[in-house]
Structure formats: C-alpha cells, structure tokens
Image (cartoon, rainbow, N blue to C red):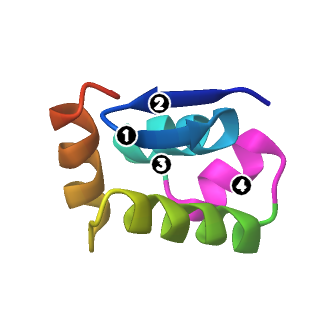
Amino acid sequence: MGETTVNNIKLTQREMSILQEVAIGRTTPQIAEDLGLSPETVKWYRKQLLVKFSATTSAELVRKAIMNNIL
C-alpha cells in the first residue's frame, strides 16, 4: 500500500478510502461492507484518523481533511 502525505499528515491508501467514505456520510457497517472489512477494523481505522487529525468527531475529521487539502 502506498501513502499520501499532505501537511505532515500521512495516510495509507486504506485510511484514505475510509476517510472518503466517512466524508460522504457512510456508517461504520456500510464502510465495512463496501470495503470487505469487519466493523471492528473500520472502527479502529476511524479512531486512527481522529488521532492523526486531532479531531473528536467525524464532522471535525472531515472539516480538517478539507482544510488540509486531503479531501
């Protein structure tokens, strides 16, 4: 898997896929089904994204990703 680095935020391809799904309003079960992952795995990735962006909610995560030109 490759990585994307923007403004010192490094995201794997999987993290980017999940971030894009979050940005369009998909739920954890929907993302899990779309990407062939377990809901627990998606939850783990979502938590990692929140940490990387210093965000506490999905809305804040998406807002910060947009502000950093990642979305």
What's the CA distance linking mark 1 and mark 4?
Answer: 27 Å
The overriding secondary structure of the stretch rendered in magenta is: helix
13 left or right of 35 in image? left
67 left or right of 33 in image? left
In the structure shown, which secondary structural element does the residue marked by tag 1 occupy? loop
Where residue 1 sits, quadrant-wise, is top right
Q: Residue at x 81, y 64 (%)?
A: 38
What's the CA distance linking mark 4 and mark 2?
Answer: 24 Å
What's the CA distance linking mark 2 and mark 1?
Answer: 6 Å
Disc 3 and disc 2 in contact, CB within 8 angstroms: no
State the residue lying farthest toward the front. 8
The tag earlier along the polypeptide, 4 or 2, is 2
Confirm whether the magenta stretch covers residue 35: yes
Q: Which residue is mark 3?
A: 26
Span of residues in magenta: 27-37
| Amino acid on which disc 2 is placed | Thr
Q: Nearer the viewer, residue 12 or 63?
A: 12
Q: Which residue is mark 2?
A: 5
Disc 2 and disc 1 in contact, CB within 8 angstroms: yes
Q: Residue at x 53, y 65 (%)?
A: 48
Q: Residue at x 41, y 68 (%)?
A: 51
**Residue 71 position in % (x across, y down):** 33, 27
| Amino acid on which disc 4 is placed | Ala
Q: Which residue is mark 4?
A: 32
Q: Which disc, if any, is residue 8?
A: 1
**Residue 52 position in % (x across, y down):** 41, 59
- Mark 1 or mark 4, whichever is nearer to me: 1
Compared with residue 55, is residue 36 higher up or lower down, i.e. above or below?
above
